Amino acid sequence: MSAPAPEPGRPSWTSAVRDRVAGLVPPGQALPDRQPAYVASWIYVFGVATLAALLVVVVSGLALAVGGAAWWHTSSLGHFVNSVHLWSVELFFAAMVIHLWGKFWMAAWRGNRGLTWVTGVVAFVTSIGTAFTGYLVQSNFDSQWISGEAKDGINSIGIGSFFNVLNPGQMLLWHVTLLPVAVGIITVMHVVLVRRHGVVPPLDDDREGAAR
Amino acid sequence: MGIVLAAGTYVHWGVVSISLTNLLIIVAMIVIFVLALVLPFPAARDRRYPPEDES
């Protein structure tokens, strides 16, 4: 028995979601294999380098979550994965900051790209929070010292009563669930907006002169 | 497990105090940024289109 064909033109939430998803980016721009000539510069590499580093961060973080603290503190493989997680975060932030410098000096918010810029800023700030909670869940004397220092800063802004940096369980859940989900969502929004509006042309390009 | 005895080398400049490691990382990032601006990109010509073709 075959499923009945949908009535043409009949509105439903399924068709609304389908149209919404299909219309997120122009046709052919979701994963383009060609780019404008001005994109052939090393400065345009750091956005995707940030994404690549984030992928390694997530995968190594998943491995650490599977193994647990006793594993990453005692076994040689655990030490290695722990170091991969640390250094991929270092590369993630280095690439993201160089990406930020490049986009700032090419005024990448031009041409109706303001929301792209803002989502990048929010992704940066959320990533910093994720990294800071990572310092707190190493389960060693370093994390104990950092949380002791951090509590004064957190208390000074009045959120220490519900965001307790001295509570490793709470910080671990923020680090492995809430904040990574937030970073993931805002990153997807950022990438969709980049694909929706395209890569910003150089400042001396006059095609978007009216949008400056 | 080793015990770290040294606190690291710090650079002091007025009110600024930064570890030598962090300073070197920041300098390296600036160098990479400048190199990204000036080094030619080895792009294959058939994988990009000229600016006038962009819609």
Image (cartoon, coloured by chain):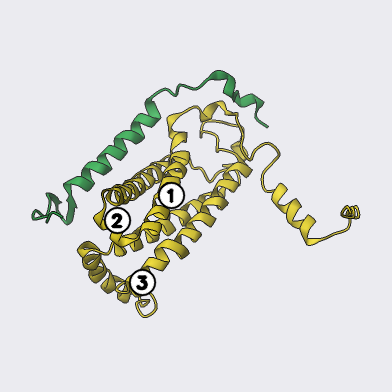
Chain colours: A yellow, B green
Give the residue displayed 56% in from the left and 42% down from the top. Answer: A212
Labels 2 and 3 touching (C-beta < 8 A) = no
**Residue type highlighted by circle 1:** Val
**Residue type highlighted by circle 2:** Trp
Please tell me whether mark 2 sits on a helix, a strand or a loop: helix
Task: Give the labeled residue for mark 3.
Answer: A169
Above or below, B43 against A23 in this view is above
**Residue A7: x, y in percent?**
91, 55
Q: Are marks 3 and 1 on the same chain?
A: yes
**Residue B4: x, y in percent?**
12, 55
**Residue A68: x, y in percent?**
35, 60
Please tell me whether mark 1 sits on a helix, a strand or a loop: helix
Taking depth in this image into account, of A4 and A93 the one nearest to the observer is A4
Task: Give the labeled residue for mark 2.
Answer: A72
Q: Quadrant of the C terminus of chain B?
A: top right
Taking depth in this image into account, of A5 and A187 the one nearest to the observer is A5
